[in-house]
Amino acid sequence: MRYRTRLTVVFLLLIGISVLTAGLFSAQLLRNSYMSSLETNMDREIRVLLATSDWSRTGSEKDTEAYYTSMIRELRESAGSRVTYIRADGKVLGDSDHDIQGMGNHLDREEVKESGVGKTGYAVRHSETLNQNMMYAAEAVADSSGKVVGYIRLAMSLSDVEDSLRRFWLFLLAGLAALVLIAGVISYRIARSMTRPLEKITRVAQQITNLDYRSRVEIHSKDEIGQLGLAINTMAESLQTQLGRIVENESRLQSVMDSMQSGIIMIDREERIMLLNRKAEEFLGFTAEELLNHAYTAANQQYEFSQLIQTCLATGETLRDEMVFYFPEERIMEVSSTPVMDGQGGMAAALVVLHDMTAVRRLEKMRSEFVANVSHELKTPIAAVKGFAETLLNGALDDEEAAHAFVKIIYDESERLNRLIGDILALSKIESRRVPLDFSPIDLNEFLKASLRMVQTEADKKHIRLDLLPAAPLYLEADEDRLRQILLNLLSNSISYTPEGGEIHVRAEHVPGATDDQDDRVRISVTDTGIGIPKKDLPRIFERFYRVDKARSRSSGGTGLGLSIVKHLVELHRGTIRVESTVGVGSSFIIELPVIHQ
């Protein structure tokens, strides 16, 4: 039952009980008033009867009965009530309403017992003779000597009193019904006015429970209910502010975690994954939905990884190790497991951090290989210079022709050594991005023509035809010197690896952006009819000191760093380079550069 209904029922019960209680008291007071008034009247009438009639008649019983019966019936008209005369022994000598022959001894009647000379006795009971409630009043009759010779009794019906009380109760109940109806409407409106604010407050509280902290209570008064509504609104504002801060902090934390290059995994004491970021998903090969609230063994990693986490959870120590992950792809990972303490100083979870060391280790390997390659490349010309210098010192200077040849070799090797060191220094600067680029507009067709003229002499020595394919006017922003370095390097390589009588084709074309967000680009391709590059060597062609034909490269004076320099310079221009090649057919180096540098 709703509180509003219960409150209305309580109001009605209070009103009903109050009215009924007042009615009971009023009815009892009215009845007592009627009875008291009736007793007073009957007492007065008895005394009048005693004073105005002769009650000392004696004689035969039959004559006495006839006398008293006749007199009492005459007195009934004046008394207005039933009159009975009872002899001192209890025998009825006369009655105004009934034949005395059928009436028993009345000495045991209550009113008779309580009566006396000058004292009236009263009694109320149901009359079997008249079949109604009656009030009886009796007083003793004494002779001249004071001896009681009989009793005069008056009897009056209580039907008038009962009718009055019945009418009173009927009026009372009708009034009560009307009052309950009116009071019900008024009570309901009062209860509604009292409960509607509470219902609104309850509804707002439920909405707040459902995390709708924007809900507010409309306050129309400053009473206790208004104060409660104000408290609810204040609480909602506080919760909304705190939730906003929590969401903002959580969003910041999630953004930080998602932008981290390290994988983060939090594992609780029950060995379940509580938290992981996107990088951890990438490293483990599973999504957060597949791993959250599951055991960390669901990641299906090697035994060493699981053992490190289990040891951290068991001992509470910070552990660090480097291991190889083979799923979803092979990676060298540095795994760090750190205990996370709770407020009581106990261990709550283990925080596992995954660092991808693959690139670092690859760079270390490349650095090591670079040092070894540099050492190897430097060793050859230095050994040649040293050997021929020793030969000259040991007497070859006397042979003019041999000395000239040896000095020429020393000069060539020193030139090669100079080029190698120059390329190493240039590559170092380019890789460290310490090479400043001066971007300016370039007419690409004129630029390509000028570049081909610079290598024309070298190409003519091998009877190689240089061909610039016609193209529409093209312009782009680039560093002209570095772009020429790129193109000359590619043209020189093509000339070196193209047999005599071959061809080299250079083309430039416009490439529109595939989407609105993608800028237009310029594609430059250098295609030759040379010896080609084996398919297995294509992925490594741009590595430092990598040679497809090592003997031929050295004999041509190459340092093995040209294509690596080209690749880095193209990337500095925010472009891309790739190679397509077929052994025995030729190779094509394709460069794509943005039209406008950003």
Image: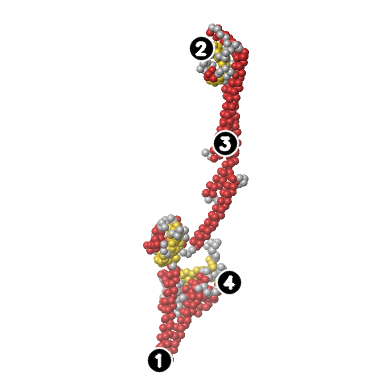
Look at discs 4 and 3 and give the one toward the viewer.
3
CA distance separating discs 4 and 3? 94 Å
Of marks 4 and 3, which one's residue comes earlier in the chain?
Answer: 3
CA distance separating discs 1 and 4? 60 Å
Occupied quadrant, residue 317: bottom left
CA distance separating discs 2 and 4? 150 Å
Depicted 327 relative to depicted 365: above or below = above
x then y, percent, for residue 282: 45, 61
Label 3 amino acid? Phe
Q: Nearer the viewer, residue 365 or 26?
A: 26
Label 1 amino acid? Gly
Label 2 crowd bin: few (<14), some (14–19), many (20+), radius 10 Å: few
Q: Nearer the viewer, residue 527 or 464?
A: 527
> Which residue, given by chain and number where applicable, does mark 4 sit on?
441
Of marks 2 and 3, which one's residue comes earlier in the chain?
Answer: 3
Label 2 amino acid? Gly
Look at discs 2 and 4 and give the one toward the viewer.
2
Q: Residue furthest front?
A: 145
Quarter occupied by the C terminus: bottom right
Q: Nearer the viewer, residue 45 or 183?
A: 45
Disc number for residue 11 = 3
Of marks 1 and 3, which one's residue comes earlier in the chain?
Answer: 3
> Which residue, given by chain and number where applicable, does mark 1 sit on?
395
Determine whether the residue tagged by mark 4 lies in a helix, strand or loop.
strand
Please tell me which residue is depicted at 47% across the width and 77% down the height of the picture: 424
CA distance separating discs 1 and 3? 136 Å
> Which residue, given by chain and number where applicable, does mark 2 sit on?
102
Please tell me which residue is depicted at 51% across the width and 16% down the height of the picture: 107
Determine whether the residue tagged by mark 1 lies in a helix, strand or loop.
loop
x then y, percent, for residue 258: 49, 61
Label 3 crowd bin: few (<14), some (14–19), many (20+), radius 10 Å: many
Q: Is residue 537 left or right of residue 232?
A: left
